[in-house]
Amino acid sequence: MRMQDVLARLRALPCLVVCAIEGAAIGGGAELALACDLRIAGSQATLATPQSRLGVMLGWGGAAYLVEAVGRGRAVELLTTGRTVGAQEAVALGLVHTLVPAGHAEPTARAVIEQAATAAVASVRAVKEVLDPAASPADVARIFAELWVGDDHRAAEAVWHDRPR
């Protein structure tokens, strides 16, 4: 339960959470990676959820995160076979968002974070909030309206209108 809470809190953070994977993310490591918003993997990275071969199952909430990433059918296949997925296949399946040469996952993750840091903080929070499966159309409309009248939008709009054409 403690690790379920930790991963749920990680997912609920209002900031972008980016994971750099070099080497093997197996079992709990894969669950931790799946709890992140973005996953960047070096070309030698592998992911596996071998719990079914060990007589158990994912216990930290990662099964739901896996379904979200790859769909129910693929999740069932990965969870019941426990097979190891290489980095290229992980991208094709949606387990990983970006594939980079071995040794470049962390610097790439840092670059993504730096780029995202240029976005309005309220907008990043809003993206995460509206992508939550529990968000209703009314929630989306409310959040958009709040951002529309917010200081970040007004400042950006002023810059947009003053730009050279």
Image: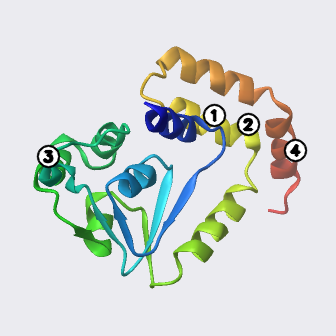
Callout 1 amino acid: Ala
Quadrant of the image containing the C terminus: bottom right
The structure residue drawn at horizontal position 50% and vertical position 34%, both measured from the top left corner, is 8
Which residue does the numbered mark 2 point to in the structure image?
122
How busy is the neighbourhood of tag 2: few (under 14 within 10 Å), some, or many (20 plus)?
Answer: some
Is 106 in front, or is 54? 54
The structure residue drawn at horizontal position 32% and vertical position 38%, both measured from the top left corner, is 59
The structure residue drawn at horizontal position 66% and vertical position 44%, both measured from the top left corner, is 15
Please give left or right for residue 148 compared with residue 71 in the image: right
First in sequence: mark 4 vs mark 1 = 1
101 to 28, vertically: above or below:
below
The structure residue drawn at horizontal position 49% and vertical position 40%, both measured from the top left corner, is 7
Q: How many marks?
A: 4
First in sequence: mark 2 vs mark 4 = 2
Which residue does the numbered mark 4 point to in the structure image?
158
Which residue does the numbered mark 1 point to in the structure image?
126
Q: Between tags 3 and 4, which lies in front?
A: 3
Which residue does the numbered mark 3 point to in the structure image?
55
Callout 2 amino acid: Ala
The reply to whether dot 1 and dot 2 touch (C-beta < 8 Å) is yes
Q: CA distance from mark 1 to mark 2?
A: 6 Å
Question: Could you say where residue 10 lies in the image, as x and y percent from the top left?
Answer: 56, 41
